[in-house]
Image (cartoon, grey):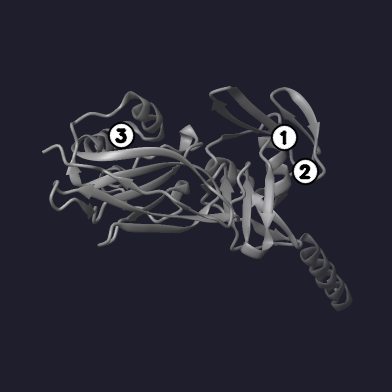
């Protein structure tokens, strides 16, 4: 190869290399799916946000399969209302959702051995509303605005006896669990079921706290939405029963072993379960008196 040809080859190679583009490092966005924080982050490719398709679908608890013969990605999940099955191909605007054909403006692409999809494409195929809040670096799929937050506070007390009366329920536990927590996000952490305080706030949309020396508690910056609010006394003992109403609401949120651990908690100490809504930019007050201990 002549020197001139060599220079030309290097120049062409440089043009080809630089025109391919590359995936930049993962961004710092927090990603939520139906009020549950996903363990995934979008990438920047050619100035646009993309997800690793396999990573985000698996994080959202979809089954993910590539049919090499048909060159088709098949993603599905079973819901209480039925099965959702998604089929798509690289660089094709057409995709199938439960056998119905649709068109997207942002088809999947293949870069650096990764199948990439945009937040809009993920929103379209999962039929979940997309909200991106750039100021807070939040990408939310679903009906909840995870960038909108509110606060909750209150006082927990109990009755010592008829002479001394009301006392603060020091170290009583407070837990917020999303009411629409999907079945695939059931709580399997037995330590949390026992302590109600072992996981970082925000994990799977769950927040917890303890009453201070005056019985006061407050939890700030809770994503707006509907929650189960659970108070568990530290100073009053229970009559070893759980109401059927409460069990029907809590049991589906926990795995078998973690529910058994929580059930022991609720039978030993008095508790109170409520359905509440955290409202954007507001502080709601929820207090409770556990009354007298059973023994």
* Left or right: where 189 falls relative to 204: left
Q: Secondary structure at mark 1?
A: strand
Give the residue at mark 1: 88
Q: Residue 147, image x and y in percent? A: 60, 56
Calculate the distance from the C-alpha at mark 2 to the C-alpha at mark 1: 9 Å
- Label located before the other in sequence (3 or 1): 1
The extreme front residue here reads 163
Relative to residue 101, is residue 140 depicted above or below?
Answer: below
Q: Residue at x 79, y 31 (%)?
A: 102
Q: Is label 2 in contact with label 1 (beta carbons under 8 Å)?
A: yes
Q: Position of residue 162 (x, y in %)?
A: 14, 46
Q: Quadrant of residue 6?
A: bottom right
- Left or right of 268 in this view: 93: right
Query: Circle 3 is placed at which residue position?
Result: 259
* x and y, in percent, of residue 66 in the image: 63, 35
Crowd rating for badge 2 (residues with CA inside 10 Å; few <14, some 14–19, many 20+): some
**Residue 186 found in image quarter:** top left
């Amino acid at each position: 190869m002549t020197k001139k040809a060599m220079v030309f080859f290097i120049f062409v190679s440089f043009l080809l290399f630089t025109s391919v583009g590359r995936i930049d490092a993962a961004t710092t966005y927090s990603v939520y799916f139906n009020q549950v924080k996903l363990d995934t982050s979008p990438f920047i490719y050619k100035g646009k946000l993309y997800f690793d398709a396999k990573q985000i679908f698996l994080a959202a608890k979809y089954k993910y399969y590539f049919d090499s013969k048909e060159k088709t990605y098949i993603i599905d999940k079973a819901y209480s209302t039925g099965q959702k099955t998604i089929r798509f191909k690289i660089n094709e605007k057409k995709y199938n959702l439960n056998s119905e054909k649709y068109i997207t403006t942002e088809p999947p692409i293949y870069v650096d051995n990764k199948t990439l999809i945009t937040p809009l494409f993920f929103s379209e195929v999962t039929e979940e509303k997309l909200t991106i809040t750039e100021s807070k670096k939040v990408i939310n799929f679903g009906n909840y605005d995870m960038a909108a937050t509110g606060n909750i506070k209150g006082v927990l007390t109990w009755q010592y006896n008829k002479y001394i009366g009301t006392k603060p329920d020091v170290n009583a536990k407070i837990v917020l669990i999303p009411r629409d927590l999907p079945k695939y996000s059931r709580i399997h952490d037995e330590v949390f079921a026992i302590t109600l305080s072992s996981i970082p706030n925000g994990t799977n949309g769950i927040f917890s706290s303890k009453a201070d020396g005056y019985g006061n508690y407050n939890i700030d910056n809770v994503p707006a939405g509907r929650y189960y609010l659970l108070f568990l006394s530290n100073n009053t003992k229970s009559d070893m029963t759980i109401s059927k109403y409460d069990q029907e609401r809590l049991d589906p949120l926990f795995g078998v072993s973690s529910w058994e651990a929580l059930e022991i908690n609720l039978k030993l100490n008095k508790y109170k379960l409520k359905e509440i809504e955290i409202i954007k930019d507001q502080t709601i007050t929820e207090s409770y008196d556990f009354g007298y201990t059973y023994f």
